[in-house]
Amino acid sequence: MHGMMMDTQLMISSLLTFADRNFPEQEIVSVTAENPRHRYTYRECFKRTRQLANALDGLGAKFGDRIGTLAWNDYRHLELYYGVSGSGMVCHTINPKLTPAQIIFVINHAEDRLIFVDPLVLPLLEAIQEHLTTVEQFVILADKANMPETTLSNVLCYEELIGEYSDEFEWPEFDENTASGLCYTSGTTGNPKGVMYSHRSTILHAYASSLPSVSGLLPTDSVLPVVPMFHVNAWGMPFGVLMCGAKMVFPGPKMGDSETLQALMEEESVSLTSGVPTIWMGLLDYLDQTGKNIDSVQKVSVGGAACPMSLIKRFRDDHNVLVKQGWGMTETSPLGTVFGLRAGMEDYNDEQVAEVQAKQGHGIFGIEMKITDEENKEQPWDGEAVGRLKVRGPWVAKGYYKQEESQSPLDESGWLDTGDVAMIDAQGYMQITDRTKDVIKSGGEWISSIDIENAAVGHTAVAEAGVIGRYHPRWTERPLLVVVKQAGAELDKAGMLEFLVDKLDKMSMPNDVVFVDELPHTATGKISKLDLRKQFEDYEFTA
Ligand code: AMP
């Protein structure tokens, strides 16, 4: 027997109509290349989004077409998120930090028909345009006065384009499993792989990310996503924020600029912000140097890479900000686990709370997780057993766009093998100990490169640290620690090792420390272990 409830489909456009009705005066503030503070209301945003939907129709875009965006976090990109997906097309967010060859690959692979591009990223497209086989039209995200010169052919001006169309548009309703967004993972091996989100997965993810234990957003909040909208939909914020009716603050191309971030936080009373650890390290240093504050900020979501303990403590002690670490990946939309305290932890002192914050977090309803050994046998949640982290749920990818089943990321029982190695404690907190391919196998035992990196960045003279396994005649592999020093700081190998000695077990102590000017990064800002390994291909331990 079926239940007798309405079969209303979960549509991305319904977020927009809901927010329009309920929070029309709420603000969206953006930094753009042409305007340091563009501000308008939800109502104005949605009016323009409907104009955009009509414009897409006018350009001949059809249901299911992939529409590319090469853009920063700003209001026009938000309009594209909703205008494209709401019309039944697929919003393909392209990461401008991919290599030119990868950008050509993702655009051709997705078969993008139109590309909406920020003027600042234009040179990148100009250099590759002859290799793009499917793009019919480029739309530059600017008004007429700010249209740049370009060698691209078939170019339109965004403001002129949407200005020609009516702001009345009936959002279509269709199957909630219809594709809505496409994001390619910048994998460290092979070509990028396309993760195809649906309306259903996006809405369910937005619900989950709004839970009190996750973002807990209220209409009185002001949210600054510093995670790019081209990387896993800025962790879903553009959807969750509208669902909760909060104020949205976008840093535009100034994502890595601490001065702009601090000014936005102060002027726009930002209460929640989100980003990768590197961004926050930069901001904290800037605040130290200038003596400026971020008084309105209550919570910082940190993910994408392990959050160093020093970051948790500096935010807590110097700025009274709670760090909420979360774990996820492009394939999980990305929400997987998040920090939060359990009943019974009310009396924890600061240090005990920080220990919990340094873990990747606890489960969220909707995502099942487990750790398994090499034979796919589930391992206990005892805080000791380590295994491959596998997840399952309605916002987890079951395959990659246009890839054969043989390349499926799922294991034989239908769970997504995340490629992360983790342990889970008895209270359900998950801790990443490594990536499967980054794990160092020394004398038959697994050594966590992440543990060593985290310990190393705890030293005030260390700006960044990467650990790789290198061949060792006795142990097969031993850890090599590669360090970038803070500008002007003094540190040598002996000093580094001495600092680590009481923080790591004997087996994990690196055999050598090498200092470099910079570490190689992937397009999403993670240390590229692949490149680091290449860089140290000929390295040999002397002891
Ligand atoms: P991406 O798909 O580019 O977002 O990368 C996802 C990967 O980033 C995960 O599989 C993890 O290896 C890593 N990651 C994400 N969040 C965390 C975290 N909080 N701690 C450690 N690693 C993380």
Image (cartoon, grey):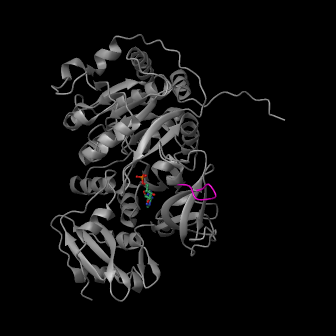
Nearest the camera: 24 or 12?
Answer: 12
Classify residue 467 as left or right of residue 375. left
Which quarter of the rendering shows the N terminus?
A: top right
- Is 259 within the magenta? no
* Residue 194: quadrant of the picture: top left
For the question of whether residue 220 can be seen, the reply is no
* Residue 517: quadrant of the picture: bottom left
Q: Residue at x 22, y 24 (%)?
A: 153
Give the dominant element type of the magenta stretch: helix, strand or loop. Answer: loop
Image vertical order of residue 59 relative to residue 332, above or below: above
Q: Residue 114's x, y, as percent?
A: 35, 27
Image vertical order of residue 94 relative to residue 57, above or below: below
Q: Residue at x 36, y 80 (%)?
A: 477
Q: Residue at x 24, y 45 (%)?
A: 259
For the question of whether residue 406 can be seen, the reply is yes
Figure quadrant, ligand 1: bottom left
Which quarter of the rendering shows the C terminus?
A: bottom left
Q: Residue 535's x, y, as percent?
A: 23, 67
Image vertical order of residue 510 relative to residue 432, above or below: below
Nearest the camera: 186 or 285?
Answer: 186
The residue stretch that appears in magenta: 409-415
Classify residue 318 as left or right of residue 483. right
Q: Residue 362's x, y, as percent?
A: 57, 59
Q: Residue at x 44, y 24 (%)?
A: 83
